[in-house]
Image: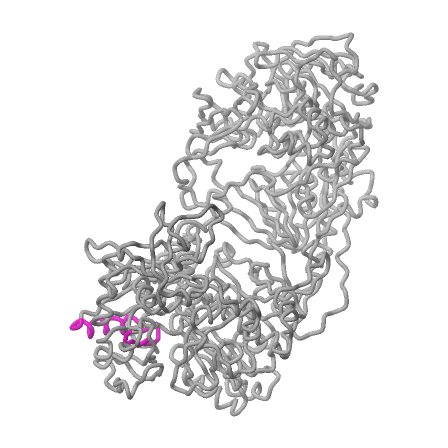
């Protein structure tokens, strides 16, 4: 959502504005002096540059002022705005790119200050190794793979759940994935195309395999089991790669909240917490959003520095202007630092969720500054049979153990290309899982390998995994020297922990318009420069050491709030113990396998895309990752390739023999995670999906059985069926009653605009095709408005209230458009006219009293009003009281009958309506709705603008030349009536149609053709039916239609294809009822 | 005061608004303030009429966008550089209009009675800002939208005029077109579900 700075109101959401096209295209002073070509240029030709462009906008939902903006059409950036009438300012430069890590080089390389801690390397708070050797784990019989002490789970709160029909127990604090692992279940489904068994690969949102279906309490498809918090009574099933939508309506509530802050921090890992802590006590408004149930991020997975996490969380909880949103995933980064997040508020409560709490909430956050501390995802490697259940990302295994006390296996082999898997391996070993060996693709793994060996773990440098066995779960892994087929060894394991490197989670940064660059050292794409006020901190920026991430986070938080005028405070950061010196990772994607191997090496597990598939894609000529993505579908599943994207880029780069840095990544687009339509809809559904506009008489209509028609957002009574009547019978009855005696309808929805000022008459003469300035006070005139191209765009009556005051009515659906139209001309073209326009649509309730007996009814209620025709003629208005209520009564007819429109305060409309009902009772007064109104007006050939017209119809086409002034020197649309196109004899004219069978009904939209037999296509079309009704007065069906040269065809027979029949019809005048107008005066 | 024969746009919702107010235990108060006098006034703020009209009203019409000026019960809202909305106690529209027209004399001033065009909802209570934030994209934090502020914007899916009342934490007036008032009441009551 762009912010557009209104020159008066300041920055507002773009949704409050309407676009008005190119600015500085002045209305020609004398259109009549222009050639057709010059006039066509004014009407239809506009510039379309790439780059800065001057445009008109109006703050339609705000101050209603028109102004000009210079917008860069290639970036949508609004470079400047200026008021209507002001000169176009000098060119403005676009915002420069902002580095994603502006001061990184200045930050202390030694890491945070603080007491150097005495924590043991890889230390785990309260961790105890597995004691028993039975293989059942320490969690008791029900949780055979549960660590006895580790995990942030509540062991006193056991939860019962069902997966694929079997009942299990877990604990509060488990995810569905960790609870399954604790029960020894690792397979969670089969793959979408190949049907291969797949198991839990990760411990988070990036999960490609363990995507399951929740069946109860409410069905939801395709949820990563690693993100589903366990609750009692959860029923889930595995999926064959795709889920099933619920067939019953979702009973939950969803809502949305707008939020504003000085600083939004995305991610509550070490970098994000340090960022928020730096800003916490400054008074700046801070939002910290994190997708987990509790802050900590990667520290929860490593179980390090949890004291600091707790202290920082407490600090944030007590800071008055800080809001911490947990279980909240920021999923979209839009213009002007507008970010969308989804908060999962009651999902984790299962059946215990309170009914009045929205299940999910979409946060629409407008942030002055953003710090993205979104971490990184570990990626896998493409080795043969790398998809068996039991293959798991190394850090994820550690997370399952430390966060949930869930042991993913008993005996593990570790395969890595970088240092990070060593810490994971050592921690996994400390938790009681046997680590048979660390297979490192690097020939010289350095200090971390020494530490592993010191802990008693075999390290195989310069080796790689070349195959796996098992059915379905891994039982053995084959290892060989890197790139060789000889010297293979087999390891009997049930767990293969893999680390192929790390991908910074740069999705949001990329969505913000930021550019990524390839970092040689990391072997990954990292944020480079951005277009918005955003920084990236921690692993998301490519800083993977904890000390660096903390320092960078604190610095980013400080910079952000100081830029907003607040003073930061150096946050307390945890004491860190020295780490082994790092060894650079090996950048490898496809692991060389034995040449005889026919096993698949999977790249995108969720789409079943293999190295062979990508090879076919490049073989077919695909030369970019955007091509191969579409050719193979790699990266298009609902995980959006979080673990596979960079891997796919790496594989394609190898296949093409180019550097991955030249190839780049595919484009990141919102949403970062799947978001349900229900959450996006929020409370805008059902009756609240669109505003319902009602008149002051709405409740009477409801009470009297009206059925309603939607006209724009208005609910208008359509017809009032009596017992047993269908629509046809009710409308025939309402029509007959009104033509024969008296009917009344609620006409309050007509748009009404008060036009005031000494130049009001001049202004209306410019807007309408006919003359308004000559109208006498007390009189009314029908008028037509056209666009400059001469096409009808609205019609209605104009009442002269006083010498300098008119009341203009518009069609129901067009009221706001007409007012905007008036303001546009006044503010941009004719600012010197002294005239003001104000909407008064709801200031008046209007009742149309129609029929030969209407004079009697009105006379009975308005004793002071002289109602005789000579006293109160057609197209006059009178101020009086009706039923004791102050009223403005207009003699207007939209039916051809004697009729009045009575305008009163809506506060008294009900009293007026009931008085009319009572006074009309002796005449059988009948309430009628829009359908009857349509029939009555169509019988008279009165068009409805927007139904009988479609923006290509002139007043002359409608047979309304009489409403087009010949005297006025100019009005909007006049010049176009002299264009060659508008004087063509074969233009479509509005005419009547009478089916030869008086019972034959022509559906609206029916085409008309000349012959009784359809010729071979293309069939020449003469026009189409715009309105079609059954007439009580005519005793037959009839229609209005726009037909080529229609007025010259009156009396001709044409044919209307209806279904498989050609219905013969006769072209007629559009005025089918009372053509001599005898009924108008009663 | 208004006579009892009048029916306000939200008369039918009064019971539900009151029930939500009671149910919220003081967190939110929702009520219609019906029949307030509302006049739309337009003239050149730099023209000679400005001072005379100001004197006649006993307040200077606000020139700062999106601000209000109050004098007693009379509140003047900035709607545009040449447009204001005057809000006063019920029943005063005729007297107020003639006061302005007399003060302006021959100067062109447009005055339009719009008392029935919109109705006014009172939204107050400690959770009032939270409630409105469900559907209003403006920053309603007291730092950004304190006493003296007003704005024409959207709430839910309808246009409104928001007015911060004159005391901090005294909540808001929400002026809404009468035809949309039923929708907005339904919307507010739905949004209030969590606070009730």
Residue A60 location, quadrant: bottom right
Is A569 rendered above or below residue B53? above
Image quadrant where one finds the C terminus of chain A: bottom left
- List x then y, in percent, for residue B75: 49, 76
When asked about the image quadrant of residue A137, the answer is top right
User: Is B35 on the left or on the right of A978, as rendered?
Assistant: left
Asked if A154 appears above or below B64 in the picture, the reply is above
Image coords of residue A595 (percent x, y): 74, 13
Is A730 inside the magenta-drawn segment? no
In depth, the one of A1057 and A597 nearer the eye is A1057
Compared to residue A371, the image places residue A595 above or below, namely above
Q: Main secondary structure of the magenta part?
A: helix
**Residue stretch in magenta:** A897-923
Query: x and y percent of residue A38 in the render?
Result: 66, 70
Task: Find out whether residue A909 is within the magenta segment.
Answer: yes
Considering only vertical position in the picture, is B141 above or below A921?
Answer: above
Residue drawn at x 64%, y 13% as measured from the top left: A411
**With A54 as the anchor, is A939 left or right in this view?**
left
Which quarter of the figure has residue A471?
top right
Q: Is residue A718 visible?
A: no
The percent position of residue A725, horizontal first and vertical second, equals 21, 55
**Residue A686: in sight, yes or no?**
yes
Q: Nearer the viewer, residue A715 or A830?
A: A830
Q: Nearer the viewer, residue A356 or A1043?
A: A1043
Q: Taking A249 as reference, is A428 left or right?
A: right
């Amino acid at each position: 959502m762009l912010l557009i700075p209104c020159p008066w109101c300041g920055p507002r959401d773009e949704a409050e504005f309407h676009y008005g096209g190119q600015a500085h295209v002045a209305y020609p002073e004398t259109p009549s002096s222009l050639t057709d070509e010059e006039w066509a240029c004014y009407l239809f030709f506009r510039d379309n540059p790439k780059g800065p462009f001057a445009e008109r906008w109006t703050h339609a939902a705000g101050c209603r002022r028109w102004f000009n903006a210079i917008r860069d059409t290639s970036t949508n950036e609004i470079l400047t705005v200026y008021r209507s009438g002001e000169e176009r300012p000098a060119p403005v430069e676009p915002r420069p790119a902002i580095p994603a890590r502006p001061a990184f080089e200045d930050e202390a390389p030694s890491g945070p200050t603080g007491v150097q801690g005495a924590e043991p390397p890889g230390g785990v708070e309260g961790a105890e190794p597995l004691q028993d050797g039975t293989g059942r784990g320490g969690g008791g019989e029900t949780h055979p793979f549960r660590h006895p002490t580790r995990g942030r789970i509540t062991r006193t709160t056991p939860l019962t759940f069902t997966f694929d029909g079997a009942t299990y127990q877990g604990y509060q604090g488990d995810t569905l994935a960790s609870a399954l692992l604790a029960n020894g279940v690792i397979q969670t489904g089969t793959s979408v195309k190949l049907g291969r068994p797949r198991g839990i690969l990760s411990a988070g949102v990036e999960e490609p395999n363990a995507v399951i279906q929740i069946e109860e309490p409410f069905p939801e498809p395709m949820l990563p089991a690693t993100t589903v918090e366990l609750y009692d009574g959860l029923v889930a099933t595995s999926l064959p790669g795709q889920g099933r939508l619920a067939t019953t309506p979702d009973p939950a509530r969803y809502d949305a909240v707008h939020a504003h802050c000085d600083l939004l921090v995305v991610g509550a890992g070490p970098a994000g917490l340090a960022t928020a802590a730096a800003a916490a006590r400054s008074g700046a408004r801070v939002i910290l959003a994190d997708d987990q149930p509790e802050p900590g991020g990667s520290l929860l997975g490593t179980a390090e520095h949890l004291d600091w996490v707790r202290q920082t969380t407490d600090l944030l909880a007590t800071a008055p202007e800080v809001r911490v949103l947990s279980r909240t995933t920021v999923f979209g980064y839009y213009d002007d630092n507008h970010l969308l997040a989804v908060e999962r508020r009651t999902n984790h409560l299962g059946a215990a969720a309170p009914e009045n709490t929205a299940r999910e909430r979409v946060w629409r956050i407008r942030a002055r500054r953003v710090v993205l501390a979104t971490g990184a995802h570990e990626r896998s490697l493409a080795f043969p049979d790398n998809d068996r259940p039991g293959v798991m990302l190394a850090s994820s295994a550690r997370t399952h153990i430390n966060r949930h006390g869930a042991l993913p296996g008993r005996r593990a082999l570790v395969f890595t290309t970088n240092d990070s898997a060593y810490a994971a391996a050592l921690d996994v070993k400390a938790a009681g899982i046997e680590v048979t060996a660390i297979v490192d693709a690097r020939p010289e793994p350095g200090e971390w390998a020494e530490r592993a060996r010191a802990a008693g773990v075999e390290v195989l440098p310069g080796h790689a995994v070349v195959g796996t066995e098992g059915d379905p779960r891994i039982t053995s892994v084959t290892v060989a020297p890197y790139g060789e087929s000889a010297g293979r060894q087999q390891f009997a394991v049930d767990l293969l922990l893999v680390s192929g490197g790390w991908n910074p989670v740069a999705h949001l940064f990329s969505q913000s318009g930021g550019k990524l660059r390839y970092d040689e050292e990391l072997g990954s794409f990292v944020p480079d420069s951005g277009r918005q006020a955003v920084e990236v901190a921690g692993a998301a920026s490519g800083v993977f050491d904890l000390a660096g991430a903390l320092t960078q986070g604190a610095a980013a938080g400080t910079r952000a709030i100081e830029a907003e005028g607040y003073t930061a405070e150096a946050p307390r950061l945890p004491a860190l113990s020295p780490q082994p010196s790092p060894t650079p990772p090996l950048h490898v994607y496809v692991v060389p396998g034995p040449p005889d191997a026919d096993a698949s090496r999977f790249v995108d597990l969720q789409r079943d895309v293999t190295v062979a598939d990508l090879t076919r894609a490049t073989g077919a000529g695909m030369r970019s990752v955007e091509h191969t993505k579409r050719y193979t579908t790699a990266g298009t599943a609902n995980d959006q390739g979080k673990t596979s994207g960079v891997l796919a880029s790496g594989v394609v780069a190898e296949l093409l023999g180019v550097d991955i840095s030249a190839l780049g990544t595919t484009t990141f687009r919102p949403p970062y995670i799947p978001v349900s339509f229900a959450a996006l809809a929020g409370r805008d559904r059902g009756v609240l999906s669109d505003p319902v506009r009602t008149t002051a008489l709405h409740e009477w209509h409801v009470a009297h059985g009206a059925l309603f028609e939607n006209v724009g957002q208005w609910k208008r009574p359509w017809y009032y069926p009596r017992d047993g009547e269908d629509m046809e019978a009710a409308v025939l009855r309402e029509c007959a009653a009104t033509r024969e005696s008296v009917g009344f309808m609620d006409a309050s929805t007509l748009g009404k605009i008060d036009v005031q000022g000494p130049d009001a008459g001049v202004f209306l003469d410019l807007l309408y095709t006919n003359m308004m300035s000559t109208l006498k006070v007390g009189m009314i005139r029908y008028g037509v408005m056209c666009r400059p191209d001469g096409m009808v765009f609205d019609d209605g009556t104009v009442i002269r209230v006083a010498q300098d005051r008119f009341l203009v009515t518009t069609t129901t659906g067009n009221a706001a458009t007409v007012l905007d139209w008036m303001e546009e001309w006044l503010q941009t073209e004719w600012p010197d006219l002294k005239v003001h326009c104000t909407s008064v649509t709801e200031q008046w309730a209007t009742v149309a009293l129609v029929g030969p007996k209407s004079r009697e009814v009105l006379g009975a209620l308005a004793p002071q009003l002289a109602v005789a025709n000579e006293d109160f003629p057609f197209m006059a208005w009178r101020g009086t009281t009706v039923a004791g209520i102050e009223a403005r009564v207009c003699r207007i007819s939209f039916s051809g009958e004697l009729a009045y429109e009575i305008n009163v305060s809506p506060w008294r409309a009900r009293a007026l309506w009931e008085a009319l009902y009572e006074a009309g009772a002796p005449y059988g007064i009948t309430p009628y709705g829009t359908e009857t109104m349509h029939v009555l007006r169509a019988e008279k050939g009165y068009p409805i603008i927007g139904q009988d017209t479609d923006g290509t119809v002139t007043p002359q086409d409608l047979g309304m030349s009489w409403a087009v002034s010949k005297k006025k020197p100019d009005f909007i649309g006049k010049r176009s009536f002299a264009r060659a196109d508008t004087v063509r004899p074969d233009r479509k004219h509005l005419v009547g149609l009478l089916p030869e069978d008086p019972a034959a009904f022509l559906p609206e939209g029916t085409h008309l053709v000349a012959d009784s037999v359809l010729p071979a296509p293309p069939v020449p079309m003469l026009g189409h039916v715009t309105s079609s009704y059954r007439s009580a007065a005519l005793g037959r069906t009839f229609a209005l239609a726009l037909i080529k040269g229609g007025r010259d065809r009156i009396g001709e027979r044409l044919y209307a294809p209806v279904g498989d029949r050609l219905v013969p019809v006769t072209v007629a005048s559009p005025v089918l009822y009372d053509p001599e107008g005898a009924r108008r005066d009663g | 005061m208004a006579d009892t024969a009048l029916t306000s746009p939200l008369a039918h919702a009064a019971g539900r608004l009151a029930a939500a107010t009671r149910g919220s235990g003081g967190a939110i108060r929702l009520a219609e303030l019906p029949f307030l006098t509302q006049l739309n006034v337009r003239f050149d703020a730099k023209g000679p009429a400005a001072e005379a009209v100001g004197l006649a009203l006993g307040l200077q019409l606000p020139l700062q966008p999106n601000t209000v000026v109050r004098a007693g019960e009379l509140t003047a809202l900035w709607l545009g550089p040449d447009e204001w909305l005057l809000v006063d106690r019920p029943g005063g529209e005729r007297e107020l209009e003639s006061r302005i027209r007399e003060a302006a004399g021959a100067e062109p001033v447009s005055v339009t009675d719009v008392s029935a065009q919109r109705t006014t909802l009172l939204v107050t209570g400690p959770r009032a800002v939270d409630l409105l934030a469900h559907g209003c994209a403006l920053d309603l934090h007291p730092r950004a939208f304190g006493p003296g502020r007003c704005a024409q914007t959207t709430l839910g899916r309808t246009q409104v005029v928001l007015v911060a009342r004159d005391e901090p934490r005294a909540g808001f007036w929400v002026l809404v077109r009468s035809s949309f008032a039923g929708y907005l009441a339904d919307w507010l009551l739905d949004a209030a579900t969590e606070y009730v």
